[in-house]
Image (tube, rainbow, N blue to C red):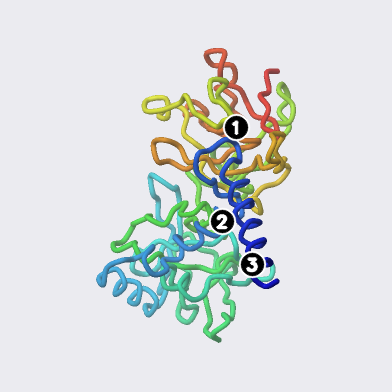
Amino acid sequence: MKTSWRSASLVASAAAVLALTTACGQESAPSSSQNVGATAAAGDYGTAGTGLGTGAQNEQSNANQASAAGQLAVSANAEVGNMVTDGAGMTLYRFDQDTAEPPKSNCDGDCATTWPPVPAGDATAGAGIDKALLGEVTRADGTKQLTVGGWPAYRYAKDTTAGDVKGQGVGGKWYALAADGKKAQQGGEAAEGGEAEQADLPGLSTREDPTLGEIVVDKNGHTVYRFLKDSPWPMKTACTDACLEKWPVIKPVDAADTKGIDLKGSGPTGQGYVVFDRPDGLKQQTIDCVPIYTFAGDKKPGDTNGQGVGGTWYAVAPDGKAVKG
């Protein structure tokens, strides 16, 4: 009886693997959005074999962890806009899985090695910093961590010189801090129609467009598109090489970091919110097994300049269908 039960269990396990393998018609088992989140977390945190890799970087991490914040300032960066830096000019970051109300850090263990918490002890407000927005949170190990606008502040172990922003956008969860605690954004709060506020959107969500109706947008509020020459069943892409310069892929977004997106698929497996392992090695998010993109010609939230391009590119509805207006 024991042997029979074990054999049945192995058969069931094999069937489950086969079901995943055929999801969206991929030749290899795709990662579901939940699995993608777990994988990203491991890489982001710098666990053994995935993160820092060299003794010099580990030493830098230890130095970052031990160094005090000093006098904070606002520094301009061409890539991320106005951001908070510490007394040594190192960029400070925030983590989307933390909370600001109440302040709470969810980065411990290996995560805190790659993203050293900034000590609250001697932090002072320099130019551009509102002292009233500085605070502290008690971490699980009892230490006090600096908060800005309620958000726990971190450095990134791979930033080795003042002004580095290598941590910007890592895993779709880590962003340079703005002076008000929001995510730093090009143009600042007053420019580009409030793009700093747009940066606090989920990884994927929806908005009501006055012409197209409900469409999907990314974490920056930019319109998400699909390419009619792509195939969802089986999942294939016709956008490669130079095409990707105009139509960047949407990187994997955890299901928990979405709002208003239909996470179920209409195909035979019922798994539509999966990651596409592209032939070029990139990993691309899909909705209903449809690969999704943004458009380089959209410069700000609300732009739909990619709509109808070539008669093959269209905004995406929450269920993955093309919105043709």
**Residue 179, percent across and down?**
52, 59
Per the image, the residue denoted by label 1 is: 290
Look at the numbered disc 3 and give the secondary structure of its residue: helix
266 shown above or below 185 = above
**Residue 320, percent across and down?**
67, 32
Q: Give the quadrant of residue 207.
A: top right
Per the image, the residue denoted by label 3 is: 6
Q: Nearer the viewer, mark 2 or mark 3?
A: 3
Cα–Cα gap, marks 1 and 2: 19 Å
Q: Residue 37 bears which disc, if any?
A: 2
Q: Tell me the residue at 52%/28% (across/down).
A: 298
The amino acid at mark 1 is: Val
Look at the image and tell me whether residue 37 can be seen.
Answer: yes
Residue, far top: 311
**Residue 249, percent across and down?**
49, 36
The amino acid at mark 2 is: Gly
Marked residue nearer the N-terminal end (1 or 3) = 3
Cα–Cα gap, marks 2 and 3: 31 Å
Cα–Cα gap, marks 1 and 3: 38 Å
Look at the image and tell me whether residue 261 can be seen.
Answer: no
Q: Tell me the residue at 63%/26% (across/down).
A: 315
Q: Nearer the viewer, mark 1 or mark 3?
A: 3
